[in-house]
Image (tube, helix red, strand yellow):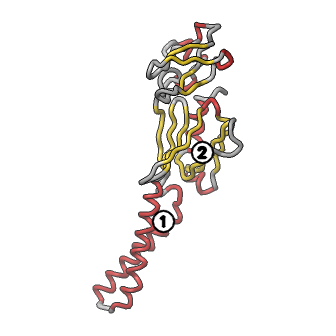
Amino acid sequence: MIQFNCDRCDMLIELDDDQAGTKHECLNCGDINRVPNPHNADVQQPDPNDPINSKKIDRAAKAGYPADFGPETQVLKVRRCWFRSRAIRFSLAVLIVLSAIIGLLWTKLGNHGYTYIALFAPITVGGIGLLVWWWLDRLTASFEITTKRTIMHRGFFSKSSSEVVHDNIRNIQVDQTFLQRITNVGRIGISSSGQDGVEIQVNHLPNPGQLKDIIDLYRPI
């Protein structure tokens, strides 16, 4: 039987010996703890500040990110892109809105009557509404990487989240179209060993390749 204290709340945790070296969620505070190895006390909690350990064990600390050991720490949190993820459609929407506004000004200054106003006003309102919708859609999802798990937050007024512990990640998919490669955005899908499908899937994320590389620093690979 392995006994150790939670990194965050100091609650005593007891696990079977076969859990040594894995990560376990504290039932009291939710923090993810690395289960120590009772047969080798010297490697229970490697010190990331030790030059030897940081080079041999903690790849994240070596790369300049928060250490993999100790209490859970946020590494990075990003939201979906607004312009870069839909550059062509965004540019067309802005062009249409500007053209409609110019049309309204032309109608007003030239006193051309209400026929053109009835034409340009809906286009202006619709174009602006589309841009606002894309902005709100950007705010409804975020992608968070901590030292121990990856979390997808969804919702604007209501909230929901999905998470995968880094030790349990089986596969990370990065998909980019040709235009997305140019603008450096894309979709990330994450699946764990306990599920058949993709548990976390977020599109329009900036720098998806870099996000994958950061997650890999905290995976046992």
Task: Single out the mark in the foreground, 2 or 1.
Answer: 2
Q: Earlier in the sequence, mark 2 or mark 1?
A: 1
- Image location (x, y in percent) of residue 37: 62, 13
Going 60% across and 13% down the picture, which residue do you hit? 2
Tell me if mark 1 has few (under 14), some (14-19) or many (20+) residues whose alpha carbon lies within 10 angstroms of its own: few
Total labels: the figure holds: 2
Q: Residue at x 57, y 49 (%)?
A: 202
- The residue carrying pointer 2 sits among few (fewer than 14), some (14 to 19) or many (20 or more) residues within 10 Å by Cα, namely many
Query: Label 2 to label 1, Cα distance in Å?
Result: 30 Å
Q: Which residue is mark 1?
A: 91
| Residue 163 appears left or right of 132 | right
Q: Amino acid at mark 1?
A: Ser
Q: Amino acid at mark 2?
A: Ile
Judging depth in this view, the residue of 106 and 140 nearest the camera is 140
Q: Position of residue 153 (x, y in %)?
A: 49, 45
Residue 142 at x, y = what percent? 48, 46
Q: Image height check: is 144 above or below 178?
A: above
Secondary structure at numbered mark 1? helix
Q: Which residue is mark 2?
A: 200
Which of 147/95 is in front?
A: 147
Does residue 84 lie above or below 91 as drawn? above
Q: Residue furthest right?
A: 196
- Taking 44 as reference, is 76 above or below it? below
Q: Which mark is residue 81?
A: none
Q: Secondary structure at mark 2?
A: strand
- The quarter of the picture where residue 120 lies is bottom left
